[in-house]
Amino acid sequence: MADLQDTVRSVKDTVTSPLPSPEPMQAKSSANELKERLDWGEPALTILDVRSREQFQQERILGAVNVELHELLPQVQNVHGIETNRDIYLYGENAEQVSDAARQLRGAGYIRVAEIEGGLPAWKECGGSIEGVNTKDDYSGTRLTFTTDDQSKG
């Protein structure tokens, strides 16, 4: 009987133990760390692309939101309504641009902001999914290509 009770206790401990989770968010995160969180199925995060609208249209991380640097805070606070405790991942044209965006957000009270090191190139290199009108098949990951009627007639 003691063996059965020990077995039941062992199974309970195993089944009720907390599930593993991805690494906690850091001020600077690799593209692979973000990809692991997304692969894990963590929906409670926002990816912001602070490049120009034109660059964003050409190619971007799947699901990213475009907010140009010069209108970052009004867009994040008023248009998108992103809460200050939400996990926000940033990427842009270069490290300086991303650092500036992170500084603005942290200064406005956003407490969970991560800069994606290496930006879009690093994201593509780790096999992250991308979308846009200029996606190419020479990168790994899933590609979604959108065209307008005018582009498909040529």
Image: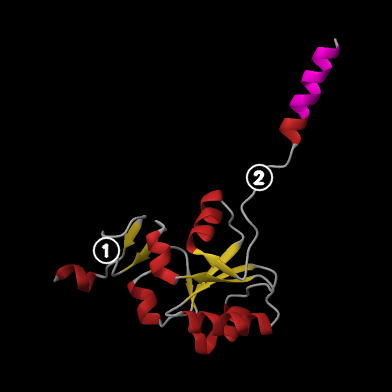
Q: Residues within 10 Å of mark 1 (few under 14, many from 20)?
A: some
Res. 28 in view = yes
* Residue 49 on image: x %, y %: 47, 75
* Residue 146 on image: x %, y %: 31, 65
Quadrant the C terminus occupies: bottom left
Tell me which corner region of the image, top left, top right, bottom left or bottom right, holds residue 58: bottom left
Task: Compare residues 95 and 37 and report the one nearer the observer.
Answer: 95
Give amino acid for label 2: Pro
Whether residue 11 is in magenta: the answer is yes
Whether residue 52 is in magenta: the answer is no
Q: At 30% across and 69% down in the image, what residue appears?
A: 133
- What kind of element bears circle 1? loop
- What kind of element bears circle 2? loop
Q: Relative to 51, is 8 on the left or the right?
A: right
* Residue farthest right in this picture: 2
Give amino acid for label 1: Lys
> Vertically, is 43 above or below 152?
above
Q: Relative to 114, is 148 on the left or the right?
A: left
**Residue range highlighted in magenta:** 2-12
Q: At 56% across and 49% down in the image, what residue appears?
A: 40
Q: At 41% across and 69% down in the image, what residue appears?
A: 120
Q: CA distance from mark 1 to mark 2?
A: 35 Å
Tell me which corner region of the image, top left, top right, bottom left or bottom right, holds residue 152: bottom left
Disc marking residue 136: 1
Q: Residues within 10 Å of mark 2 (few under 14, many from 20)?
A: few
* Residue farthest top in this picture: 1
Task: Give the residue pinned by disc 2.
Answer: 20
Q: Relative to 116, is 146 on the left or the right?
A: left
